[in-house]
C-alpha cells in the first residue's frame, strides 16, 4: 500500500488548467453553436451579434476555464497538503506490471 502524502502545487495547477481549458472549449463549441443557430433565426434580428458572440465564446471560454482551473487546482493541492499532514494522505495500491506475472 502506498500513500500520497503531498501534491506538487504547480504541477497540479497546470494539469487542472489544461483539463479545464479543454472542457471550456467543449462548452464553447456547444453553446456557441446554440447561440449561432438561434441568432440566425428571422425573429432574432441580430445575426451578426450572435455570430460574433458565438465565436467569442470559442476564444473566451477556454481562457476563463483555464484560469479558474489553475487557481482551483493550486488551491486544492495546497489544501490537500495541509489536511494530509493532519489525517494522512490518500492510500493507494500500486501493481508493478513487469513483475505481476513473476510473483504468481
Image: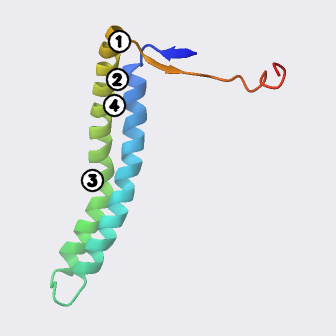
**How many C-alpha atoms fall within 10 Å of the one at disc 4: few (<14), some, or many (≥20)?**
many
Residue 92 in the figure: left or right of residue 21? right
Q: Nearer the viewer, mark 3 or mark 2?
A: 2
Q: Nearer the viewer, mark 3 or mark 1?
A: 1
Q: Which of marks 4 and 1 is in front?
A: 1
Identify the element where label 3 is drawn. Answer: helix
Question: What separation in Å lies between label 3 and label 2 (alpha carbons)?
Answer: 26 Å
Which residue ends up furthest to the front in the rendered image? Answer: 104
Which label is found at residue 73? 4
Question: What separation in Å lies between label 4 and label 2 (alpha carbons)?
Answer: 6 Å
Residue 99 in the figure: left or right of residue 16? right
Location of the N terminus (image quadrant) = top right
Which residue ends up furthest to the top in the rendered image? Answer: 85
Which label is found at residue 87? 1
Pointer 2 residue: 77
Q: Work out whether residue 90 or residue 55 is closer to the camera in this orientation and state it.
A: 90
Amino acid at each position: 500500500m502506498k500513500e500520497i502524502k503531498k501534491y506538487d502545487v504547480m504541477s497540479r495547477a497546470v494539469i487542472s488548467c489544461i483539463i479545464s481549458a479543454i472542457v471550456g472549449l467543449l462548452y464553447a463549441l456547444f453553446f456557441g453553436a446554440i447561440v449561432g443557430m438561434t441568432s440566425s433565426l428571422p425573429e432574432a434580428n441580430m445575426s451578426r451579434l450572435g455570430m460574433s458572440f458565438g465565436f467569442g465564446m470559442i476564444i473566451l471560454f477556454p481562457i476563463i476555464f483555464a484560469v479558474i482551473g489553475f487557481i482551483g487546482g493550486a488551491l486544492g493541492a495546497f489544501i490537500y497538503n495541509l489536511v494530509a499532514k493532519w489525517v494522512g494522505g490518500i492510500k493507494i495500491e500500486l501493481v508493478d506490471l513487469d513483475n505481476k506475472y513473476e510473483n504468481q
